Image (spheres, rainbow, N blue to C red):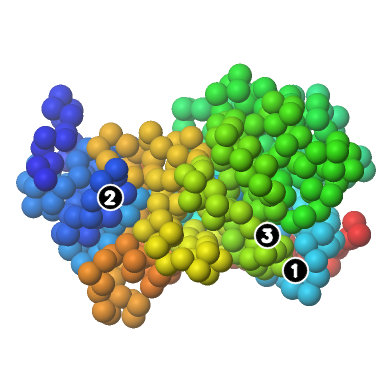
Amino acid sequence: MNSQTMNSQSQPFPTSAIIVRGTVITMNAARDVISDGAVAVVGETIAAVGTYADVSADHPGAIIIGNADQVVTPGYINAHQHVTGDRLIHSCIPDAIDSQEAIFGWAVPVHSAHTGDDDALSASLAAVEALSNGITCTVEAGTVAHPERVAESLRQSGMRAMLGQWGWDVENAPFAAPADEVLDRQRIMLDKLPPGNGLVEAWVTLVGHDLMSDALVSGASNLARERGVGLTFHLSPHSGDAVSYLARTGRRPVMHLDDLGVLGRHVLIAHGVHLDDDEVETVLRTETAIASCPWAYLRLAQGVTVAGRHGDLFLRNGRLALGCDSENAGDMVDILRAAALFVGLERDRSMDAFSITGQHGLELATIRGAEAIGKADTIGSLEVGKQADIVVHDTRGPQWLTMSTDPVLQVVWATDGRSVHDVLVAGRHVVADGRCISVDVDSLRGAALERRDHFLASRAPMV
Ligand SMILES: [Zn+2]
């Protein structure tokens, strides 16, 4: 491949161009993998993809990241992540409780006691872990109490993110408000962080489940359509949402939301695990996207192996992405780990080794994930003109001592975020030598421990 033919002919190459070198897994339409390949980055965007010999000849004086032995992939997309809430009590919530107690006995009361400083600290910690594991784009899950502080932390980290302010219109709960007020909060964030104006942009975000009135979810969907942004909310990770929707509306959750006109390509449902056949058809027909968080379902014992329908959605070309969810649900912010689990679960469930493979897992982590969040035109693959969101895997670790002839299989099955060595987001070098360099990581540790002790000492469960 001649990289020169893919360059913008009118664009001069500054000497500050970066070349990322390694075996390049492009995830382009042809799924090209280029041995001793390279990606040239000029400013925020990818200027060339090709062999190292071609790309380096076209970019004399460029800064080189990686080497011929490394493995280069697109940045990973995490379509459902709480960056605040229970991060400061990371791995403190016990396992032997049900998900309702984990959320309402731990996560929500702890988060309701957060100050703006706590939310900012929490978001920085989440961003450091995500970036260090190669995640370059995160959709926040709808539970941010101090969105401007969180947005500032994420902006400083250099991660790409979509977020809004905590949204639910229930009674007697932290951050609750009437539907109109919740929608006004969303409008404020959309005004402050409009799409296309920096790496951190606002979406309309609701908690979801049965914690949103018809007026709120309808208004939220209309608002997202008007502003050309996404709407995300939780639904049916367990069977409880169906029970409550049937009691209130006589319809299962997805069918009721479809009746309201809420669903569509702008909607990203977190979970949608417990769906019946009609709901699966409705998700596909409306082209609604689903964020699958397999570690959450296993950790919280939510029945994905019994009732999950994500494999059906995947095989029928549904719009699917992967997520890591929250600290009570998965603990590790590592999309490669989620990709391997997703693929393994679906291979076992179907008892079909041909239907879904490691290649599909990497697609979900990159280009299919980007498509599901409406960003496939700018991120998700290494192609000229796209944003330079790039991960370099260090192959000096023990899991790489035997290099596979298929690097995609090795990335999905044989490693995870631990081999991430360098990360660029929009051309900015944010992880170098396996360490996040956009944030002073050491300065976070003492504050995190101090706030952990504070929250554990003062926790007042809601259940
Ligand atoms: Zn969640």
Residue 154 appearing in the image: no
Residue 126, placed above or below residue 245: below
Give amino acid for label 2: Arg
Name the disc covering residue 93, or none: 1
**Residue 146 x/y as whole percent:** 70, 41
Q: Secondary structure at mark 1?
A: loop
- What residue did someone put label 2 on? 31
Determine the image quadrant of residue 293: bottom right
**Residue 426 x/y as whole percent:** 37, 41
Q: Residue at x 67, y 65 (%)?
A: 306
Give amino acid for label 1: Ile
**Residue 200 x/y as whole percent:** 52, 37
Q: Residue at x 43, y 46 (%)?
A: 368
User: How much space separates mark 1 and mark 2, taking CA atoms?
Assistant: 41 Å
Q: Residue at x 67, y 68 (%)?
A: 299
Q: Please state which of the two labelled residues, at mark 2 or mark 3, is closer to the viewer.
A: 3
Q: Residue at x 8, y 52 (%)?
A: 53
- Front in this rendered view, residue 8 or 224: 224
Give amino acid for label 3: Ala
Q: Secondary structure at mark 2?
A: loop
Q: Are marks 1 and 2 in contact (CB under 8 Å)?
A: no
- What residue did someone put label 3 on? 307
**Residue 50 x/y as whole percent:** 16, 47
